[in-house]
Amino acid sequence: MEQKWPQEIWLVRHGQSAGNVARDAAEAAKGLMIDIAERDVDVPLSELGVQQSHALGDWFAAMAPDQQPSVVLHSPYLRAAETARIVRQGIGGAGELTARVDERLREKEFGILDRLTTHGISHRYPELYEQRQHVGKFYFRPPGGESWCDVILRLRSVLDTITREYAGERVLIVGHQVTVNCFRYLLERLDEATILEYDRNGDVPNCSVTSYRFDPALGRRGKLQLKLVNFVAPLEAAGTPITVSKDVPAAPKA
């Protein structure tokens, strides 16, 4: 029976961004707003984020050629696009390695809560803050923004594209913390409680790897099997600091 899935999928969160740094500073100062001028889509990698991306590229480059990614899909957000570009250059086949930008891999949209710190959300929109606490982050949709379910809906169509166009390939996906978690929800067939428990246990580190490998012996037609979760050994091996800052502010985890 013909294989449906890619041979391997790697899920990578982009390297540390300038927005991550600005957010940490704003939260530490108990400020209301993150001090960053760019649109979220235009926020670049920090200097450390560039180093993290190079370390990850070196890790992929050390693999045998027939084990390396054969296609790279990435979010259009600058920090993810830069991470994907640096990793491709590290592998050494940037001119040959297929790369595709896919807007469905973009960061979760936060609407009117964009650039607000946790303190800023509770101060400016106390009713929304309370509603979010009651509904939970999985279903809560801020005005002009998205819930986790909205992100999951668009990622379902990404998986349809992957199974249609990249069966048997080795697919590297570079996105954001929420997209990594929502892919896990889909690929591992999790429920709300389980994925939120994973989220509570810790943020997805920048340039960490979560991966799945196709096993033909599983199920009727074979399945993807989880291999790595938030794997940061490539950064540790390069002596590159590990960061787990959130992409954007949000209320405390449900």
Image: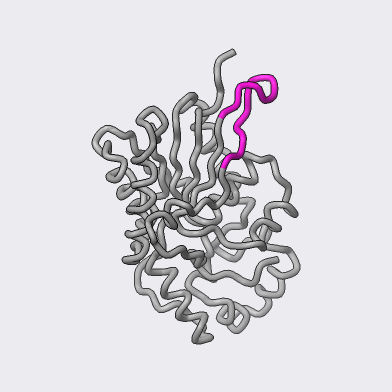
Q: Which residue lies at the image location 35% right of the left edge and 47% below the top edge?
A: 57
Is 42 left, or right, of 220 in this rendering?
Answer: left
Q: Looking at the rendering, in which quadrant would you find the N terminus?
A: top right
Q: Quadrant of residue 17?
A: bottom left
Q: Nearer the viewer, residue 203 or 106?
A: 203
Number of numbered tags placed on the structure image: 0
Q: Nearer the viewer, residue 96 or 116?
A: 96
Residue 74 seen in the current view: yes
- Relative height, residue 53 to residue 48 (above, below): above
Residue 160 lies, in percent from the top left, at 54, 32
Residue 165 seen in the current view: no
Query: What color scheme is it?
Result: one colour
Residue 147 lies, in percent from the top left, at 62, 57
Q: Is residue 219 magenta?
A: yes
Q: Which residue lies at the image location 53% right of the left edge and 56% below the top edge?
A: 177
Q: Quadrant of residue 66?
A: top left
Farthest top residue in view: 1
Q: Which residue lies at the image location 58% right of the left edge and 77% below the top edge?
A: 118
Which region shows up in magenta?
Answer: 214-227
Q: Which residue lies at the image location 49% right of the left edge and 54% below the top edge?
A: 232
Q: Looking at the rendering, in which quadrant would you find the C terminus?
A: bottom right
Residue 225 lies, in percent from the top left, at 61, 34
Is 121 left, or right, of 193 in this rendering?
Answer: left
Q: Nearer the viewer, residue 144 or 131?
A: 131
- Relative height, residue 177 to residue 212 (above, below): below
- Relative height, residue 6 to residue 113 (above, below): above
Residue 94 lies, in percent from the top left, at 27, 39
Q: Is residue 237 magenta?
A: no
